[in-house]
Amino acid sequence: MPRLKLTVAYVGTAFAGWQIQAKAPARPRTVQEELEKAVAALTGGHVRVHGAGRTDSGVHAEAQVAHLDLPTPSRPVDWLRAFNALLPQDLSVLAVEKVTEDFHARFSATGKHYAYALWLARCAVPPRLRPFVWECGPLDLPAMEEAALHLIGTHDFASFRNAGTDVETSVRTLRSIQREELSPLHHIWHFQGNGFLKQMVRNLMGLLVSVGRGKTAPAEVPGLLAAQDRTALPSATAPAKGLTLVRVLY
């Protein structure tokens, strides 16, 4: 069967995440289901769309990746135009490519790049940014960058994993954490790694903001990693709305 690779972007605000979660008609709206509805309209049957990962409810994506296997025989279709004619305005397919059968959106990935947006005030957020930033207030940015250095590398990130997904190991390699200043109040933190646990980036950001607020010292971070226990983390999970999946690496 022909296999298609999709590059997908969405505003996560009105989605309950990527993955279909419950039986119809009670199930919440998800990205996967919207894509599968479009594929069904184009092919006349149900086709499973496999994503590179499960973004949480409220998380956005600039370039999520998915794949699907077309029924055979398949009539010629301008897939990019056809998808976007059927999809809602908060979900778009940016690219469609034919790939070999050994390509898998999830298992072929070698890493991911997430970005988390902070607004360093608790008010006066531009309306166009409000759905995409955490209004966290003023922060000690040098202290946050010092703390981030302890997180880079290969570690057991069990302390940064929320419950809900079983994995063989919680060891991951965090390749880089970088801060980008778009304006004095608007800062983007970039996280690149070979993989991420459930809500791991949001927990990393929550800890860094705790450091920025002076509630946690940078020197405490190695001990929090070593605890390998989510309950040891003194900070809350950062809100979903500030997080965006920027790119999946292959």
Image: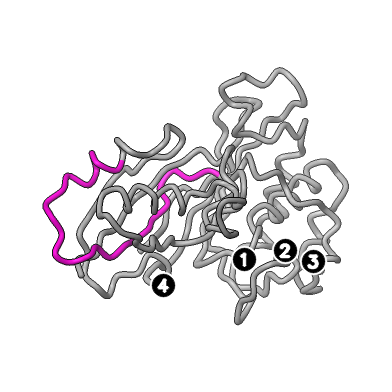
Magenta stretch: residue 65 in it? yes
Q: Name the residue under label 4.
A: 107
Badge 2 vs badge 1, beta-carbon distance below 8 Å? yes
Residue 197 - label: 1
Which mark, residue 162? 2
In the rendered image, residue 211, in percent from the top left (x then y), is placed at 80, 48
Answer yes or no: do the residues labelled 2 and 3 have beta carbons within 8 Å? Answer: yes
Residue 117 falls in which quadrant of the image? top right
* Structural crowding at the residue carrying mark 4, measured as other residues with C-alpha within 10 Å and reported as few (<14), some (14–19) or many (≥20): few
Question: Mark 3 to mark 4: distance in Å?
Answer: 26 Å
Q: Specify which label sits upstream in the sequence, 3 or 4.
A: 4
Of all residues, the one furthest to the bottom in this rendering is 168
Q: How crowded is mark 3: few (under 14 residues within 10 Å), some or many (20 or more)?
A: some
The residue depicted at 48 percent of the width and 54 percent of the height is 113
Crowd band around label 1 with a 10 angstrom C-alpha radius: few (<14), some (14–19), many (20+): many
Q: Which of marks 4 and 2 is nearer the N terminus?
A: 4
